[in-house]
Image (tube, coloured by chain):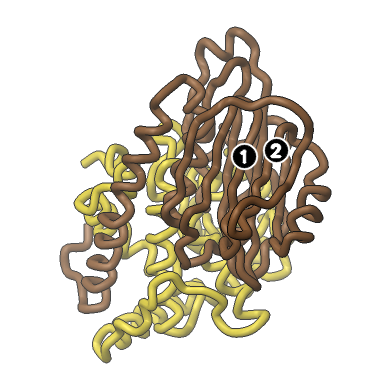
Chain colours: A brown, B yellow
Amino acid sequence: MNTQLDSFETRLLAELREHVAHNAPDVDEAERLAGRSARAWLAIAACLVSVAIGAMLIVPGLGSSPAYSVGEGNAGRVNVEINRPEDAAGLERALAERGINADITYLPGLQVCAPGRYQVTERKASDMMATIGETTISLTLPSDTVRPGETFVLTWSILPLTDEEIATRNGPFGGVVDGFSASVEFDVATGPVAPCDPIDAQTVNRPK
Amino acid sequence: MSEIPVVADIGRDPDALEAFYRAHLDPVQRFIARRVTSPHDAADLTADVFLEAIRSCHRFRADLGNPSAWLFGIARNVVAGHHRSAGRSARAHTRLDARSWLDDDSIERLAARIDAESRGRALLVSLADLPERQRSVVELVAVDGLALSEAAIALGISATNARVRYHRARQRLTQSVPTAFEVTP
């Protein structure tokens, strides 16, 4: 326990405390939304990641149908529907056509990328919305969400569970949802994004 | 004192964050001092490590390891990211402009800490030829003093895997990895 802090350490502590205090209400709101139904478990990983990049609304919802679609809404918003974790490269190209540099990763099993592959932008990604369904993801990206030099990073993995696992399984990397356990992470990264090194999400304390 | 309840709360409770910060600041700063030579970089990286811990606290699972090992994993990734950035250009990104808060006394303390870790830096250099998978374990165990089980947690691998990697590294580098260093399983 360090009780004797110098001026730098004291200032850093004060800044970190302010950072936490500033973001705490967002965490509470995300958890409140995520707690509305059993399906919200799927959204928890995304909710808690999302607060790090600003005022983002997470709405647990329903999902269905084909691989992905990308369309434009009002004021240059880009709407993304991901219905199956297939053709990540195709989705990246579709987003690139709309000026959004993206790194989409679908992982088999319940895996996540090893930490440290990118740095999250310091800028607040305001108004970005993600709706997490059972096996779907819907995203709304305002026109300035991903700026030059930045990358929208999405990692998604889904693992079907046995009935026994559904009854017993739980954890911070995703949740039990109608026979699936899922991990969803998304960020706006600044600078280069390293390739994904898949690791088992359930057997590690994954530092970022 | 148990730190386990604190980790889950450091992203929302400033008091919990402060307790966590005070408990882990020294080992984090020593870890960084073994890997950089600039007090200003050390200041930035210290801030980055705690920011990442705040951001990632929901991922921590008390049943899989202790907070120190988890935090070392974060520190390792943050420092690795720093070196990758430095290789391309200048510092790519700092969320808190920590270096701007340094005064002469703080710089002197950081410089002294960096000097004190010169042997650790020399040992890290001596491990440079090891394959990354082996070097990562050896660094944490032989240089940073983690138990093999803690290094495994920090790296996100199984304890058995960490033990195998360390053993293989020792076979390759019997002269570099100090034989006096007792490895805790």
Residue A121 drawn at (x, y percent) = 52, 65
Task: Determine whether A105 is above or below A122 in the image.
Answer: above
Confirm whether circles 1 and 2 share one chain.
Answer: yes
Residue occupying image coordinates x 39% and y 69% = B46
Residue that numbered label 1 is attached to? A138
Secondary element under disc 2, as helix, strand or loop, is strand
Q: Earlier in the sequence, mark 1 or mark 2?
A: 2
User: Dividing the image into 4 quarters, which one contains the N terminus of chain A?
Assistant: bottom left
- Residue A119 image offset from top left, x and y in percent: 56, 64
Find the residue positioned furthest to the bottom: B104
Residue ID for mark 2: A82
Q: Is residue A84 left or right of residue B175?
A: right
**Type of the residue with mark 1:** Ser
Q: Where does residue A114 sit, x and y in percent of width and height?
A: 62, 49
Extreme-front residue of the structure:
A74
Calculate the distance from the C-alpha at mark 1 to the C-alpha at mark 2. 6 Å
**10 Å neighbourhood of mark 1: few (<14), some, or many (≥20)?**
many
Is A97 or A174 nearer to us in this picture?
A97
